[in-house]
Amino acid sequence: MARSTTGSASVDAGTSSSTYSRPCAKRWPGEKRYVVLDNFSPHKHLNVRAWVAANEIELVFLPTYGSWLHWIESEFAALRYFALNGTDHRSHDEQNAAVNAYIRWHNAHAMPKTAFAVDSPIRTWTQYPAKAA
């Protein structure tokens, strides 16, 4: 997929914002939608802010050094631990096979994350939506 750059924000060429916002709006009509992000500067670009405003989405930025709050970080940690740590793959194909085997296993045993960081202090000092975790 071709990528173009506008200012400092990278945008996928040929991909409209409706590709992402319409399915969410259909799934949760009338409800506020949130996108959880780290503090990477392109997430705060004017083009991103304009898209968010046009699509009635609120950006929720994680605190600095709060990567443990982002669900994907725990997934990456588990992937590294179970598929990559302590290994000496002879080729990229062998490494890809190990990663794919872990992902297949993980997906077969996946459960919805409905009680993520329930006792975390962040829930007491933010307006964290109850249905987000």
Image (spheres, rainbow, N blue to C red):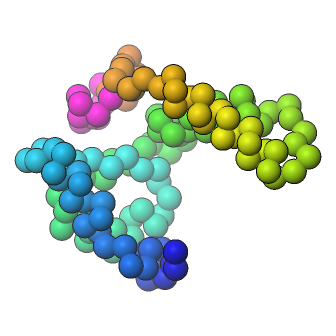
Q: Residue at x 74, y 42 (%)?
A: 97
Extent of the magenta region: 124-133
Q: Position of residue 125 (x, y in %)?
A: 30, 30
| Direction from residue 123 to residue 99 in the image, left or right | right
Query: Relative to 131, is 121 on the left or the right?
Result: right
Q: Is residue 119 above or below residue 79?
A: above
- Residue 112 relative to residue 65: left or right: left
Residue 6 image position (x, y, % from top left)? 44, 82
Res 74 visible: no
Question: Does the segment drawn in magenta span residue 45?
Answer: no
Q: Quadrant of the C terminus?
A: top left
> In the image, is residue 84 above or below residue 2?
above
Residue 51 shows in the view: yes
Point 86% across, 31% down: residue: 86
Name the residue at 74% across, 38% down. Answer: 98
Q: Quadrant of residue 102?
A: top right
Residue 70, given in percent of the width and then of the height, sits at: 47, 38
**What secondary structure is the stretch in magenta mostly built from?**
loop
